[in-house]
Image (cartoon, rainbow, N blue to C red):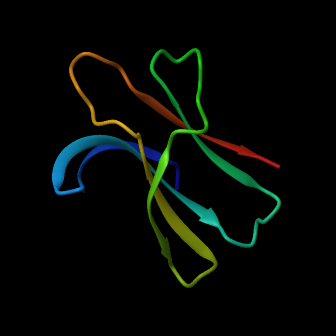
């Protein structure tokens, strides 16, 4: 499956808000690959140090689904973009 971006209602410290998320499935045996979630406000500069892991689900078949989120909730004053960079 391809990575998918979405907005999800997530509760943090008792407050629920909408966050940009990225969900992807990866092969756990592919240890030579590095998966990096990157965020941008303008599609020009990408930051790989701000995405926050939400969950990892091991499917028991050698794959896992990971969900990551942006550090700040969505608001009408800014743009947020997310991408997955896979390198070896």
In depth, the one of 10 and 26 nearer the eye is: 10
Residue 74, x across and y down, in percent: 27, 32
In depth, the one of 48 and 14 nearer the eye is: 14
The vertical placement of 59 against 15, above or below, is below
Q: Could you tell me which residue is drawn at 59 percent across and 72 percent down?
A: 63
The vertical placement of 80 against 34, above or below, is above
The vertical placement of 60 against 29, above or below, is below
Residue 67, x across and y down, in percent: 44, 56
Q: Relative to residue 56, is residue 36 drawn left or right?
A: right
Residue 25, x across and y down, in percent: 54, 61
Q: Relative to residue 24, is residue 6 drawn left or right?
A: left
* Residue, far left: 15
* Residue, far front: 13
Q: Could you tell me which residue is drawn at 76 percent across and 65 percent down?
A: 30
The vertical placement of 38 against 16, above or below, is above
Q: Could you tell me which residue is drawn at 52 percent across and 56 percent down?
A: 1
Residue 81, x across and y down, in percent: 44, 28
Q: Quadrant of residue 54?
A: bottom left
Q: Quadrant of residue 27?
A: bottom right
Q: How many marks?
A: 0
């Amino acid at each position: 499956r391809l990575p998918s971006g979405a907005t999800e209602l997530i509760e943090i410290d008792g407050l629920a808000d909408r966050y940009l998320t990225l969900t992807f499935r990866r092969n756990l045996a592919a240890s030579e690959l590095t998966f990096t979630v990157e965020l941008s406000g303008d599609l020009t500069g990408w930051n790989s140090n701000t995405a926050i892991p939400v969950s990892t689900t091991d499917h028991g078949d050698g794959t896992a689904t990971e969900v990551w989120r942006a550090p700040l909730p969505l608001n009408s004053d800014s743009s947020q973009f997310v991408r997955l960079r896979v390198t070896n």
